[in-house]
Image: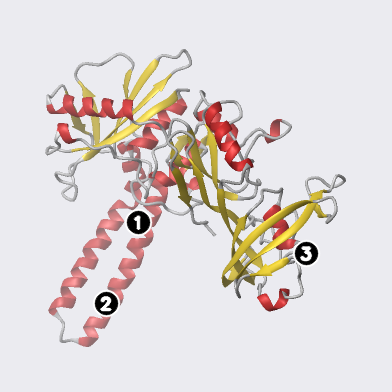
Amino acid sequence: MFPPFFTEDAFEICRQTVKDLQEQKSFLKRVTKKSLERKNQGVMLGSLVCVDKDGTKIVLKAVSGISFQLVEKKKLKNHIVVPPIVSAKRIKRALSKNDRKIHSLTKRILILSDKLKKNCANSKKNQKFTEKRQIYSGLRKKLCMESLEKVFSLYEFHCANGKTKKLLEICNKNLPPTGTGDCCAPKLLDYAFKNSLKPLSMMEVFYDKKTDFYNLKPVYPCEERCSLILPEMLGLKIVYRDKNLVVVDKQSGILSVPGRGPEKQDSIVSRLKNLFPDCINQPSVHRLDMETSGLMVLAFDAETHRALNHQFENREVKKEYIAVLDGIILKKDFLQNERIKWFSEKSGIMELYFRLDVENRPHQIWDEENGKKSVTEFEILNFENYKNPQGKVQKATRIKFIPHTGRTHQLRLASSDIHGFNHQIIGDSLYGIFTEGQRLLLHSSYLSFVHPVSGKRMEFFLNPEF
């Protein structure tokens, strides 16, 4: 996972923490029973440098897991050791109800396994032992799942927007990997947001008895667990970030920029400005429709904004989208359509003209005389069966779109309009039939531009979730 904040200052704090541990100026206090499985395993040490409302620098420190607590013999001013999201005692209480039953079933399963080994010649007994073991294993699995659900129901995180979010809500009631929520990053950010602190720099390092202070390496938030939680806590999924710009994975259902009225203030731009207060007032250089997901670039400073905006205006930015259309798109069905020029059986380009329908905003309508030209290249990727939220299966076509222009609703119209494919993008609430609980299956999957400062061409690829 790409580090959401700058790392240098926090890395130095981590280095100092390791040095203090090695010089016994601080120590790791065990707060749970020793585990043979985790004997001699190391821990992650994390740091988050923040500022409070008065601009005072606050340093937060954390240890991964729930087994150890960092104890500093000499407390430094404005240095805070962050506790776990859920204490070991609360987790133990949540597990206690099923604990004895699980241990009892485990013993029975082991006894049956031994009997199976000893009675390998007796097939009737073996069948009986095997059936019993399967029953016990099923009961144990059910109890373990119940216990895990109880534990994960305890986890709740403070977010950048001032609200809180439960772990099971973040995971759509699915059980996440064991240990989710116990990494350093969510602990640090939870404490910061809970206490109205603004994060500036965050980093983690691995520490054990063999750690070489002089060869410490930075460790970024993990993909398995932190990538589930951090985007929800931050409000943004950061794909890339430097001092000049940021590339995010925009969620479907959120505005790119704030709209009119208090109910339309939540957007990618407002969330970015909340996380990075020094960002310019208007960081967006392009937009994605509210229902569209995927890659979006924003600028932190005015000079970068001007340079990126210039690239978009001169069509120097390369973009690709993935869409799933309702129905099957075949070349033979569009040979009479003069607006579509085919390169092959599965690729081509179309030229269409649309303008705003002033009486039905924000809809666009066909107008060959007064409309603006939109040019869209396409490639049919495959045909598939799509199951909607109600369980209905429909034939669909997955298409890659390469827009050569940047018109409003260009790809939605290229799909749904009779002058184009006349097949809506699935989930299109403006130009098609919309099913409750369905999202627009349109995703910005590729973005490429020249970095305004380094001069290097940047390329980003991001597969859709659908």
Report which quarter residue 389 is drawn in. Answer: bottom right
Asked if the residues shown at circle 3 and circle 1 are in contact, with their CB atoms under 8 angstroms apart, the answer is no
Is residue 174 among what the camera can see?
A: yes
Could you say which disc has been placed on residue 303 in the image?
none
Which is more N-terminal, label 2 or label 1? 2
Quadrant placement of the N terminus: top left
Circle nearer the viewer, 2 or 3? 3
In the image, residue 233 lies at what x, y percent? 48, 37
Where is 34 relative to 371, above or below? above
Residue type highlighted by circle 1: Cys
Residue type highlighted by circle 2: Thr
Report which quarter residue 101 is drawn in. Answer: bottom left
Which is more N-terminal, label 1 or label 3? 1
| Residue at image coords 42%, 46% | 227
C-alpha gap between disc 3 and disc 1: 57 Å
Q: What SS does tag 1 mark?
A: helix
In the image, residue 240 lies at what x, y percent? 44, 41
Would residue 59 be found to the left or right of residue 305 on screen? Answer: left
Closest to the observer, 151 or 196: 196
Residue type highlighted by circle 3: His
- Residue designated by label 2: 130
Report which quarter residue 188 is drawn in. Answer: top left
- Residue designated by label 1: 144
Could you say which disc has been placed on residue 419 in the image?
3
Where is 54 relative to 146, above or below? above
